[in-house]
Image (spheres, rainbow, N blue to C red):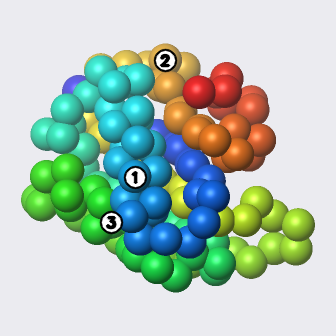
Amino acid sequence: MVVRAIRGATQLETDDADHMHERVVELLTGVLEANGLTQDDVISILFTATSDLTSAFPAVAARSLGFSDVPLICARELDIAGSLPRAVRLLAHVESPLAKSDITHVYLHGAVTLRPDLTSAQ
C-alpha cells in the first residue's frame, strides 16, 4: 500500500449544524465508496470551511461515523472575494493500492464548480 491524498468538497445551502452533519457525512461516505476504502485505510483528514460556516465543526460529523482513531483537524478556508460560499473541503490521506491517476476526487452540490478538472459532477 502507498499513501494517497484525496480531495473533496461540498456546499451547504444554509449554515446549520444538522445540515453540516448531513453534507459532511455524504462527502466522506462518497470519498470512501468512490475509492473502495474503509475507515481503516484513512490516515488523517484535514477539513476546511469558509468563514460563513460557524454552526459546527466538520470533524464532528466524521466522528459520528466512527472516525474516533483518525486524526482530524478543521481550519478556516481563505476568504477570497468571489469564492464559493458555504463550502467545506477535505484533504484525506489514505493507504490505497490505487495509482494517483485512479483516485476519484469527490465534489458535491455547488462545489462541483471548484475542480471540474479532477472529477465529473457527482
Q: CA distance from mark 2 to mark 1?
A: 27 Å
Q: CA distance from mark 3 to mark 1?
A: 12 Å
Front-lying residue, 104 or 30: 30
Helix, strand or loop status at disc 3:
helix
Q: Earlier in the sequence, mark 2 or mark 1?
A: 1
Give the residue type at disc 1: Glu
From the image, tell me which residue sits under label 1. 22
Q: What is the quadrant of residue 37 in the picture?
A: top left
Q: Earlier in the sequence, mark 3 or mark 1?
A: 1
From the image, tell me which residue sits under label 3. 59
Residue 14 pos. (x, y %): 60, 66
Badge count: 3
Residue 110 pos. (x, y %): 70, 45
Give the residue type at disc 2: Asp
Residue drawn at point x = 88 percent, y = 74 percent: 81
The crowd level at tag 2 (other Cα within 10 Å; few <14, some 14-19, many 20+) is: few
User: For the residues carrying marks 2 and 1, which lies nearer the camera in this image?
Assistant: 1
Q: Which mark is residue 102?
A: 2
Residue drawn at point x = 81 percent, y = 73 percent: 80
Front-lying residue, 17 or 43: 17
Residue 58 pos. (x, y %): 40, 65
The crowd level at tag 1 (other Cα within 10 Å; few <14, some 14-19, many 20+) is: some
Q: Quadrant of the C terminus?
A: top right
Give the residue type at disc 3: Ala
Q: Earlier in the sequence, mark 3 or mark 2?
A: 3
Residue drawn at point x = 26 percent, y = 35 percent: 95
Front-lying residue, 83 or 118: 83
